[in-house]
Amino acid sequence: MKANLLLFIQFVLVGFIFIAVTSCSKSDVSGHITGVVQIPNKIKLATVAKEAKVYIYLKDYTPNSSKEVMPWEAPVRKVVEAHINSLQDHNIPFEFKDVPKGIYRVSVLVDTGRPHVTEGSSNFTAFPGDYTGGTNQNLAVGYGQTVEVVIRDGLYVSIPDGYQAPLYLPD
């Protein structure tokens, strides 16, 4: 009986050690990307359409089978979004936690023209009236590493005379 109890205690201790090691090692196998997006001062926060949002999204450029990933093939891994008219200022902090080791870029869509991105969509194409931007170079994220990003520059997509966009576009 005493031997069984001792064996049981050993199994429990080994289990606790295993759980402690695996739960603490998550930061060792992933990294983080943090930063700030500065949306243009031309955008008057309180006057935009209630549907207008900022989308900050993480695209994965990590090579597949040693093959380079093209921009149009890079999957969107994570998205941070905010309603523009609820922002306090033009600086939007963001954080992507638990990012696997790899190569990434952060992109931004300020959807102000006629808001068109539907809930849950990963199509962040800029249309007339929108602003778009992002990191110009790849971000290498290593194990346990935090990469900091500031996105200042963007591109305004001008609205041609007579342009009428649908409110929401199909995916």
Image (cartoon, grey):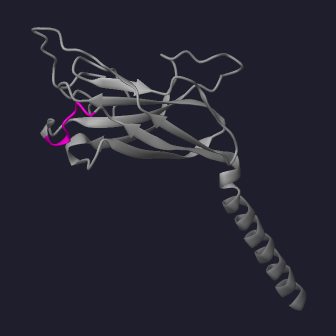
Towards the viewer: 38 or 119: 38
* Front-most of residues 151 and 103: 151
Above or below — where is 29 with respect to 22? above
Q: Residue at x 71, y 19 (%)?
A: 66
For the C terminus, the quadrant is top left
127 with respect to 8 (left or right): left
Task: Specify whether 168 is left or right of 6.
Answer: left
- In the rendered image, the vertical position of residue 55 relative to residue 75, given as above or below: below
The number of numbered discs placed on residues in the rendered structure image is: 0
Q: Is residue 106 magenta?
A: no
Q: Is residue 123 visible?
A: no
Q: Is residue 67 left or right of residue 8?
A: left
- Identify the residue at the far front of this view: 41
- Residue at the image point whose x is 30% and y is 41% from the top: 90
User: From which residue to which does the magenta span run?
Assistant: 41-46
Q: Is residue 129 left or right of residue 131?
A: left
Quarter of image, res 109: top left
Q: Is residue 49 in view?
A: yes
Which residue is painted at 66% across and 53% down in the image? Answer: 27
Q: Residue furthest left?
A: 162
Quarter of the image where the N terminus is located: bottom right
- Which secondary structure dominates the residues rendered in magenta? loop
Where residue 49 sits, quadrant-wise, is top left
Residue 42 among those drawn in magenta: yes
Residue positioned most to the bottom:
2
Of all residues shown, which one is farthest toward the top?
161
Residue 140, image x, y percentages = 64, 33
Q: Position of residue 83 (x, y in %)?
A: 25, 43
Q: Is 34 above or below relative to 115?
A: below
